[in-house]
Image (cartoon, rainbow, N blue to C red):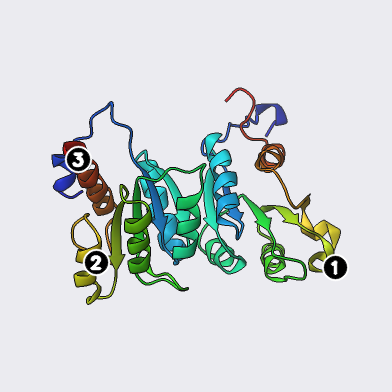
Amino acid sequence: MNAASVTVLPRRTPPSILVVENDVRIRCLVSDELRAIDFKVLEASSPDEALTVLDAMRIDLVFLAIGPLGSRGGLDVVRLIRARRMPTRIILASDGGAALAGMDADELGLILSKPYRAAQVVEFVIRILSWPEAGT
Amino acid sequence: MSTISTNIPLRADTPLPTVLVVEDEVLIRLVIADYLRDCGYKVHEAVSGDEAVAILQAPEVSIDVVFSDVEMPGDMDGFALARWVRANKPGLQVILTSGVERSADIAATLCEAGPLMRKPYGSQDVVDRIRQLAAKARRS
């Protein structure tokens, strides 16, 4: 096939984003801002819920606000995504420290520092997913 | 689609109520929240009674209807949440759902929204119940 004949069709359905944040008010705020620009947003309150959702449906991007310093639960979600070679992109929000110690930087994806603003998350998501596409 | 849904028209000029879905089973919560959003409702989600109260007390959020499971982990189950709503947000409507038979009688004393919805429920049945509440609120 001639390369010139290949047409890239615009994506018709919005990307799906899983917001994993244990603070309900922050989760609600971030999710609402992402929905306002037409992403399909699913919410999880814990890494366990996130793992259940990831087992059940295709997710394009996980925004994972991992727990307090030293918590490992959130990183289990990262490991699952990497181990299964899922195409899911990852944005982490962390207070750094022990939770990220020993993790391969390539494995982690983009990292936001806590406390983060919802607008920062939206900006990162748009940049990573290139959505909304130009002209849509 | 149930017959009720065709009998309760929504007036075009009436904004749809904002719904708080309270359910600890994540896949059940996602399905019903997604369905309600597809129907045009603004939906917030909570995993527990405690989270529901945090949302209900948040100044930036306004809720019209709480749709809550009865059986939930933590200190506050669906009944306790309904009691909290009655005491602190009296204008707000509560719909309770449960897979446990004996919950029905208790629910009847706590909700103006009719009998308890048995699990498993149909997504459209939830919409119908919310519409009934909205219609009732307009009449009163």
Secondary structure found at label 2: helix
Image depth: mark 3 or mark 1 in front: 3
Crowding around mark 3 (Cα neighbors within 10 Å: few <14, some 14 to 19, many 20+) is some
Residue B27 screen position, x and y as percent: 45, 62
Does residue A76 sit above or below B61 in this rendering? below
Identify the amino acid type marked 2. Answer: Ala
- Residue A44 found in image quarter: bottom right
Identify the amino acid type marked 1. Answer: Ala
Crowding around mark 1 (Cα neighbors within 10 Å: few <14, some 14 to 19, many 20+) is few
- Residue B95 found in image quarter: bottom left
Asked if residue A8 can be seen in this view, the reply is: yes
Classify residue A9 as left or right of residue B107: right
Classify residue A83 as left or right of residue B49: right
Label 3 marks which chain's residue?
A: B
Secondary structure found at label 1: loop
Residue A7 screen position, x and y as percent: 62, 29
Query: Is the residue under label 2 in contact with that under label 3 (CB below 8 Å)?
Result: no
- Asked if labels 3 and 1 share a chain, the reply is no
Residue B98 screen position, x and y as percent: 29, 69
Identify the amino acid type marked 3. Answer: Ala
Image depth: mark 1 or mark 2 in front: 2
- What distance separates the C-alpha of mark 3 from that of mark 1? 56 Å
Label drawn at residue A101: 1
- What distance separates the C-alpha of mark 3 from that of mark 2? 21 Å
Q: Quadrant of the C terminus of chain A?
A: top right
Q: Residue furthest front?
A: B87
Query: Is the residue under label 2 in contact with that under label 1 (CB below 8 Å)?
Result: no
Q: Which numbered disc flags the more N-terminal residue, 3 or 2?
A: 2
Secondary structure found at label 3: helix
The residue identified by callout 3 is B135
Label drawn at residue B107: 2
A57 vs B16, nearest the viewer: B16
